[in-house]
Image (cartoon, helix red, strand yellow):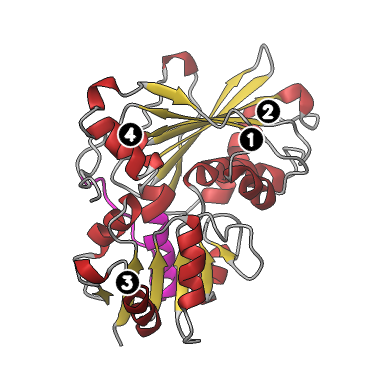
Amino acid sequence: MTSLVFIDGDQGTTGLQVREWLADRTDLRLLQLPADQRKSTAHRAEALNDCDIALLCLPDEAAREAVALVRRPGVRVIDASSAHRTAPGWVYGLPELEAGQAERIAHARRVSNPGCYPTGALALLRPLIDAGLLPPDYPLAIHAVSGYSGRGRAGLLDHEGAAAATAVPLQVYGLGLHHKHVPEIQQHAGLAHAPVFVPAYGHYRQGIVLTIALHLRLLPAGVTARSLHAALQARYQGQPCIELQPMEEDADAQRLDPRALNGSNRMRLAVFGQPQEQQVLLTAVFDNLGKGAAGAAVQNLDLMLGLQPMLQPLLHGSTNPSRIPLPL
């Protein structure tokens, strides 16, 4: 039987991308509300209870309200907001997190999509902690730059609206060091302490580059850049959505373009080492709407439908993001 999927919030940046990726699928049906019913609680509640899987692309509070509207026991929910990422009873929707996670997602009734920034941080940190190469109490600082679509509607209006010419080219934020993604990273990485997280938005639409610097002298004896790389390689061998870049002899010649994987649900990890100073840099590049938001939702949807997750192709070339229209 063909499953019925309802995207609640299909006019936002994440919802529009999910709808675009699902539009031509023949193995499911999309339940869509007319424009004049999208904000009607009664009509949304009816759709939420008529569907097989509800995909919530809403702000946190609206997502909590949507979950409360679900009355029919058979309805399964994927929440793309941050409302339930550390909540009991919800399965964390990062299939590559650890062995068995994809299976847990496949059978779950409630799945919380990972945040875009945590997706990159966890992909780098969790395998190293599990392998005993990175102590859980390491004093971590995580830096990341995202395209402005990560701000949602406000970012699109600032950078593509009437005042786009005056938009700030780079903006570091979260200086109070209590970003909403920190508890998520700490819990799912297995860290003893909250990491310092320094995010920023750049004047480009989509794509994230995330970096984590490590001092080898603070790691267990014998840990090297190559052993860290080997641990990541062992974890992601055969994973369709995550690729590990080979270690480069001439790291100084390398450049990281945050837009490199735009339009796909792929993520590229890399390890760079400076043996003289005993320093290592871990990096992740991915599309904040691809692997980070909409792509993660579609990947989890496929698992819940009993399908092999599909590798979404680059839609418009490596540096040209999918031109999702400005939300109304």
Q: Going 31% across and 30% down the picture, which residue do you hit? A: 204
- Tell me the element at label 3: loop
Q: Secondary structure at mark 2?
A: loop
Q: Position of residue 107 (x, y in %)?
A: 53, 76
Report the Cα–Cα distance between label 4 and label 2.
Answer: 28 Å
Question: Disc 4, disc 1: CB below 8 Å?
Answer: no
> Which residue is at the front of the view, 17 or 263?
17
Query: Can I make out residue 179 in this image?
Result: yes
CA gap between label 4 and label 1 equals: 24 Å
Q: Is residue 217 magenta?
A: no
Looking at the image, which residue is at 37% across and 73% down? Answer: 41
According to the picture, the residue beneath numbered tag 1 turns out to be 228
The disc at residue 224 is 2
Inter-mark Cα distance, 2 to 1: 6 Å
Pointers 2 and 1 in contact (C-beta within 8 Å) = yes
Query: What separation in Å lies between label 4 and label 3 (alpha carbons)?
Result: 39 Å
Query: What residue did someone put label 3 on?
Result: 40
Q: Which residues are magenta?
A: 295-315
> Which residue matches tag 4?
260
Sequence-wise first label, 3 or 2:
3
